[in-house]
Image (cartoon, helix red, strand yellow):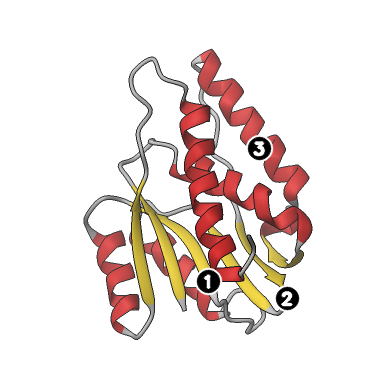
Amino acid sequence: MKVYVLQGKHDVGKSLTLATLFTKYAANMKIISSYEGDDVTAIKKQIADKYQAIRNGAECVSPYVLSVVEYNGIRIGLHTSGDDKKTAETSIKLFNGEISGNIPCDIGFCAARTKGITVKTLKDFEAQGNEVIFVKQPVALQGGDFETSNTEQAEYLLTLLNGFLGIK
C-alpha cells in the first residue's frame, strides 16, 4: 500500500490539514468506517471550531479523523493523529484493516513528527513492503494565514490522491 505521511513539529497544523483533506474527498465517497460515526459535516465543524479558537487565542482540541472511505473499490484510510508511537501504530492498524472490519486500505494519509519514534514506526511499516512517502508540513510564516497554508497543503495532498485514483 501507499502511505503519505504529513510530517512536522508539534502544533504546526498537521491534523487540521489532514482533516481538511478528508472533507475535500470524502463527501463524494462511501464512508466505510469512521471514529464515532463522524462524517464530513461533523469534521468541518471541528475544523471551524479549531480555527476560531486559534484566532481567539484559546485552546481547542484539533479535529480527529480515523476513517476509511471507498471510491470505485479503492480504499482510502486517513488518521489525523501522529505525535507518538501509539498513534503511529493506530494509523498502521487502520491501513491494515485491523480497525475497519478487516478492510485494508490501498492508500493512506497520516501524521508524524519530524524525527523519533513516530518516524521509526512508519519506516518499519515501509520495511514490510509498503510505500511510505514523507511530506513536510509547511509552517505559516509569523503573521501569516495559518488556515490558508493548511488548506493549500490539503489541496496538494488531494492532487496526490486524485492521481492515485485516476481523477483529473
Residue 80's tag is: none
Q: Is residue 35 left or right of residue 104?
A: right
Residue 107's tag is: 1
Amino acid marked by disc 2: Asn
Q: Give SS at disc 2.
A: loop
Q: Can residue 100 be seen by looking at this rendering?
A: no
Tell which of 123 and 143 is nearer to you: 143
Amino acid marked by disc 1: Ile
Residue with the mark numbered 3: 46
Within 10 Å of disc 3 (Cα), the crowding (few <14, some 14-19, many 20+) is some
Tell which of 4 and 88 is nearer to you: 4
Residue with the mark numbered 2: 72
Tell which of 75 and 64 is nearer to you: 75
Residues marked 2 and 3 touching at CB (< 8 Å): no
Q: Nearer the viewer, mark 2 or mark 1?
A: 2
Task: Identify which residue is drawn at 63% across, 60% down.
Answer: 168
Tell which of 143 and 82 is nearer to you: 143
Task: Identify which residue is drawn at 56% across, 22% down.
Answer: 53
